[in-house]
Image: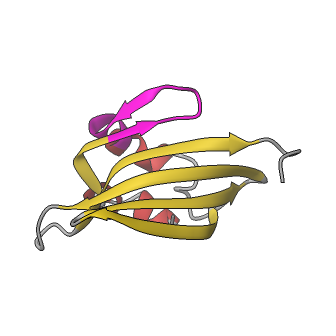
Amino acid sequence: MDPAIRASAEGARLLDPEFVEVGASGRRYTYEETVAELPDKPGSSADGPRYEPSAITGVLLAPGLVHLTFETVFDGRRARRSSLWRKRDERTGWRMYYHQGTPVPPEVA
């Protein structure tokens, strides 16, 4: 969530080469598309709004596979998020394999 990481090569290294994201629009994003757009994605500018994460929980689904859920507030908008992180080996470490964010309407508690 750190803008300096999101806009750098480090951000790309945190994504699994088979990464897929399903956006709120329903659009599917591949690893290549996501890496190419990282520097321009919302939350990647040091001078702009930042993601504020909360209610972070993780569940180990299997060795090397964690399901992470959390909420964010970004520029006044809330979202519930879900991601799968997998670890194939010690060299590459944990990488995000899948991510999906769902906007939360203002009237929902």
Q: Is residue 94 left or right of residue 25?
A: left
The quarter in which the C terminus is drawn is bottom right
Residue at point 63%, 69% (across, down): 55
Q: Which stretch is magenta?
A: 20-34
Is residue 86 shown left or right of residue 8? left
Count up the numbered dots: 0
Residue at position x 43%, y 53% from top? 83
Residue 16: % across, % down:
24, 51
Q: Is residue 58 above or below residue 105?
A: below
The answer to whether residue 60 shows anywhere in this view is yes
Seen as rendered, the residue at the extreme right is 107
Question: Which residue ends up furthest to the front in the rendered image?
Answer: 62
Q: Is residue 72 above or below residue 40?
A: below
Where residue 47 sits in the image (x, y, percent)?
63, 63
In the foreground, 55 or 78: 55
- The image shows residue 19 at horizontal and vertical percentages of 29, 44
Residue 87: percent from the left, percent from the top? 21, 64
Residue 89 magenta: no
